[in-house]
Amino acid sequence: MNIAFIYIAEPYQCYHTASVASALAAIPGCEVTEYYSFPETVTHLTRIRRALGVPALPLKPFPKSWKAKVLKKARRLDQERLLVLRENLAELNRYDVVVATEYTAGVLKEMGLKGPKLVLLMHGAGDRYVNDEHLVREFDLTLVPGPKVETYFRDKGMFQTGVSQIVGYPKFDVFEAVRKENAISFPNGRPFALYNPHYQRALTSAPTCMTPLIKGFKAQTDYNLVVAPHIKMFHRGFGIRERQLKRQQSADVLVDTGSDAMLDMTYTSQAALYIGDVSSQVYEFLAIPRPCIFLNPRRIPWRDDPYFLHWTLGDVVDDPADIMTTVAQAQERHALYKPAQEKLFRETFGEPLLGASQRAAEAIVRFLSDA
């Protein structure tokens, strides 16, 4: 059985699927090859395999036309991704299975992927509407982290009987292996809060809240602050946004625009307080229940909206002027939210927490055996 794992976006995808690729490669009869679009992916795959203590797998860069290279240089990454998939369709058609971790790969069926079965290994926590989630229908098998996500897609009629399975969240297996590498500490010894705004323009709190939040943390003495936006926030702008943000760094404010720690749960595992908007990383943070604050400067009517379910797990702040008051009360008010955090975490990722990589690999093999 020849299996291709495709990494068609930034290296964060490695932390969701590399451990599954390794688990599959260890099963007799499975030959796994990995394809990547971003050169940095190689470094992350090497790091993950070293931490897991497993051998490297055959690894190939996606060949790219001059047009794809121009799109990459212009940071038109969504367009580049589609073009790269189309240009490599014949190569992928050589395999029995193609495994991806984002909905975009569903377009391969529309482009003419005929031979291989297409498998989606979902990442994220499922609370946010994604405009290409309809492509779930194109996958022959979808592996979901927990019952919450499976119920969501079944209720929307996106699954056919027998083509989804709950396996858990493989990223936790990777984190268990790499978590001792990076300990975050500040000279003053204070705990740190994590600000993790999303990149989606219609929902992100960053334009309105970033500056007052950083100023507010510099003026208090309870916490340090780590600012680690979603990596896709820096898709465009030719580095201008990164440089502007870096200027706000200080001894008690760490600004991260692209390190490994943004991708491997270093910050979400060690922060004392989470501040964000719609990023699913809040669920990774809640592996250990802790206080959360959600920023809603756009005053979105979020109550009873399933796409904002995680906003029931902490205080929601509409006015940026109220952020620091809410921060000061967060530890005291956490008791109000802890039971709901524990419940929703279990529904999102299932149990047991570890072992999802092996469960996903075995689910793929069973599916192919029954096909």
Image (tube, grey):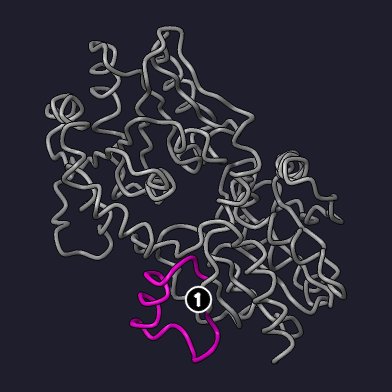
Residue 155 part of the magenta segment? yes
Task: Return the x and y of residue 232 as percentages of the image width and height.
Answer: 49, 43
- Locate the N terminus and report the quarter of the image it occupies: bottom right
Task: Return the x and y of residue 70 as percentages of the image width and height.
Answer: 67, 46
In the foreground, 164 or 130: 164
Task: Return the x and y of residue 258 as percentages of the image width and height.
Answer: 56, 32
Q: Residue at x 44, y 75 (%)?
A: 134
User: Which picture quadrant has residue 293?
Assistant: top left
Q: Residue at x 63, y 69 (%)?
A: 360
- Locate the C terminus and report the quarter of the image it occupies: bottom right
Locate residue 267 relative to residue 105 in the image: left or right: left
218, above or below 114, in the image: above
Q: Secondary structure at mark 1?
A: helix
33, above or below 293, in the image: below
Span shown in magenta:
144-164
For the residue marked with disc 1, what is the amino acid?
A: Val
Task: Return the x and y of residue 55 as percentages of the image width and height.
Answer: 85, 50
Locate residue 235 relative to residue 63 in the image: left or right: left
User: Which picture quadrant has residue 233?
Assistant: top left
| Crowd rating for badge 1 (residues with CA inside 10 Å; few <14, some 14–19, many 20+) | many
Locate residue 22 relative to residue 205 in the image: left or right: right
185, above or below 88, in the image: above
Locate residue 158 relative to residue 118 in the image: left or right: left
In the foreground, 284 or 86: 284
Residue 26 part of the magenta segment? no
Q: Residue at x 49, y 65 (%)?
A: 145
267, above or below 339, in the image: above
Q: Which residue is mark 1?
A: 136
User: Which picture quadrant has residue 259?
Assistant: top right
